[in-house]
């Protein structure tokens, strides 16, 4: 069982930055592929960024809409994954969820609200 706790959301002006954090419980964090998803009102949840497990090389991939602006990273010593978000736009407004996957195991955090508005 893995528990995920997100933090770092909030209100930011267009063009600003935020860093989301996701702290994971458990001692085998580095085996999990980690991802950030978001869901805006009235829309489906979508993948924002993902990073593979340590033994898979920690490869990253991003949604086209955030490439060049967002960066996902993981600190395996702290069991934490981050999402650095720069040049934020109003359309980035959503609830952001942390996800951990290992085989058939699939865990979600409770979500953190990000609002981009002037």
Image (cartoon, rainbow, N blue to C red):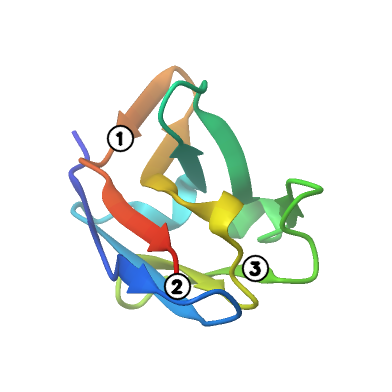
Outermost residue on the front side: it is: 118
Residue 85's quadrant in the figure? bottom right
Q: Is residue 17 above or below residue 22?
A: below
**Residue at 52 percent of width and 21 percent of height:** 44
Quadrant location, the C terminus: bottom left
**Residue at 37 percent of width and 58 percent of height:** 114
- Tell whether label 3 touches label 1 (CB within 8 Å): no
Mark 2 Cα shell of 10 Å, populated few (<14), some (14-19), many (≥20) = few
| Residue, disc 3 | 70
Q: Is residue 45 above or below residue 29?
A: above
Specify which label sits upstream in the sequence, 1 or 2: 1
| Residue, disc 1 | 108
Q: Where is residue 106 shown, x and y percent of the image?
A: 38, 26
Q: Nearer the viewer, mark 1 or mark 2?
A: 2
Quadrant location, the N terminus: top left
Q: Marks 3 and 2, how far apart in space?
A: 20 Å
Does dot 2 land on a helix, a strand or a loop?
loop
Residue 80's quadrant in the figure? bottom left
Label ID, residue 60: none
| Residue, disc 2 | 118
Closer-to-camera residue (56/63): 63
Q: Nearer the viewer, mark 1 or mark 3?
A: 3
Mark 1 Cα shell of 10 Å, populated few (<14), some (14-19), many (≥20) = some
Left or right of 76 on screen, residue 79: left
Specify which label sits upstream in the sequence, 1 or 3: 3
Does dot 3 land on a helix, a strand or a loop?
strand
Closer-to-camera residue (17/107): 17
Left or right of 54 on screen, residue 45: left
Q: Marks 1 and 3, how far apart in space?
A: 20 Å
């Amino acid at each position: 069982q893995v528990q995920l706790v997100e933090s770092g959301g909030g209100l930011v002006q267009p063009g600003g930055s935020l860093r989301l954090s996701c702290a994971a419980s458990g001692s085998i964090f580095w085996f999990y592929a980690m991802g950030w998803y978001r869901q805006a009102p009235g829309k489906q949840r979508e993948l924002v960024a993902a990073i593979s497990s340590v033994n898979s090389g920690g490869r990253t991939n991003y949604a086209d809409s955030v490439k060049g602006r967002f960066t996902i990273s993981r600190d395996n010593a702290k069991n934490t994954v981050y999402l650095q978000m720069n040049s934020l736009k109003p359309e980035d407004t959503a609830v952001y969820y942390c996800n951990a996957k290992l085989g058939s195991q699939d865990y979600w955090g409770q979500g953190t609200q990000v609002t981009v508005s002037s």
